Amino acid sequence: MPNADVPQYHRFAWDGFSFEVPVDWELSHHQTHSGFAQIEMEDDVARRLEMEWTRMQASMTSDKINRRYEKLAGEVRVLGGEASPVTEPPPGWSACLYSMPDGRRLLTAFFQASAGLHCLFKFHFERASYREPLRVFRRLAETFKVMLHGPVIWEFLDVAFQLNPECRMTGISLQAGSKLMEFDWRWRRLFLWVFSPADVILRQTKSPDEWCAKILNKYKDIRGAVFRPGPRPGELVWRREWRYIFGRFEDLYRRCNRYRAVWQVVEQKNQMLLTVYHYRTESDLSTIGLQWL
């Protein structure tokens, strides 16, 4: 019987929505394609959750979205097994549980929010009881929230922060000891690195400022700027390479000619956070609204 003192679920927040999943399910993959975005979650054993979503755009029709999800649902049905529609799902949800001959169970769920958000979920279970998929699905559905007002919270793995809702993720890299998120906002760019364990990094380097500057000077998506330690700890300064005195193409077409790079250590999480803004005016920094949680 589960220990009531041990959390059984945790919150996952991403791209303007959040929900709860079992505590050992964590983000393992993310991609976007043709207006649709996808994530996958895994535990220590196997893939557990696939989610695909889109927001209704002027160029999209409901028929196009329905065909997209019908195709994905059809891929599930061809696997065979006994289908059992989920009775009395939460409002806005529909779901079906498939029991395979080998004991595996697959639950598919569709959700349409009033904010124009359309989501398809696939839950994967290895030889689970009939009740477990239903219990996990209902927990996710009942805790699903769309962030309509104010900053958008991003929470996954050991990372948590909030941003202006207009900031769109353009890239993510998840590696052991290093996570990188890239965002765009009205042609401005934001780069967020999370390094851990911070205590090991601090022991192995004489100057954290130089260590961070070295990371940025090697990073392929920031070109034409050279970073070095600034007069104050935790803040880097930069200059343009002599070959790009007026900026590279990236700077010119974005009309962003400034960088700000800062780092900090969060002792409670044993993390080093490195933030780089590529922006136009000082007011952009507050408008982006980054706040680490």
Image: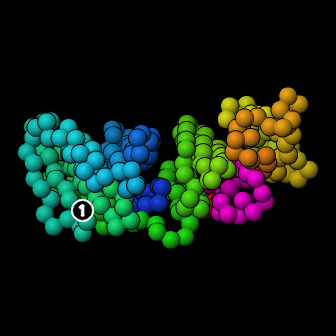
Is residue 262 at all visible to an observer of this figure?
no
- Secondary structure under badge 1? strand
Image point 12% across, 56% down: which residue?
Answer: 85
Is 115 placed above or below 242 here?
Answer: below
Q: Which residues are magenta?
A: 261-289
Taking the magenta stretch, the answer to whether it contains residue 282 is yes
On the image, the x and y values in percent for residue 221 come to: 67, 35
> Could you say which is closer to the camera, residue 186 or residue 208?
186
Where residue 76 appears, x then y in whole percent?
Answer: 19, 40
Residue 170 can be seen, yes or no: yes
Under mark 1, the amino acid is: Trp
Q: Position of residue 256 (x, y in %)?
A: 74, 47
Image quadrant containing the N terminus: bottom left
Q: Is residue 81 left or right of residue 188?
A: left
Residue extending furthest toward the front: 59
Give left or right: position of 246 versus 24: right
| Left/right of residue 251 with respect to residue 171 in the rendered view | right
| Mark 1: few/some/many CA within 10 Å (<14, 14-19, 20+) | some
From the top left corner, tell me how far across and down residue 128 is, in percent. 20, 47
User: Image quadrant for the C terminus?
Assistant: bottom right
Residue at 65% x, 49% y is: 187
In this rendering, would 162 be left or right of 49?
right
Residue 85 in the magenta stretch? The answer is: no
The residue sitting at the right extreme is: 231
Residue for badge 1: 93
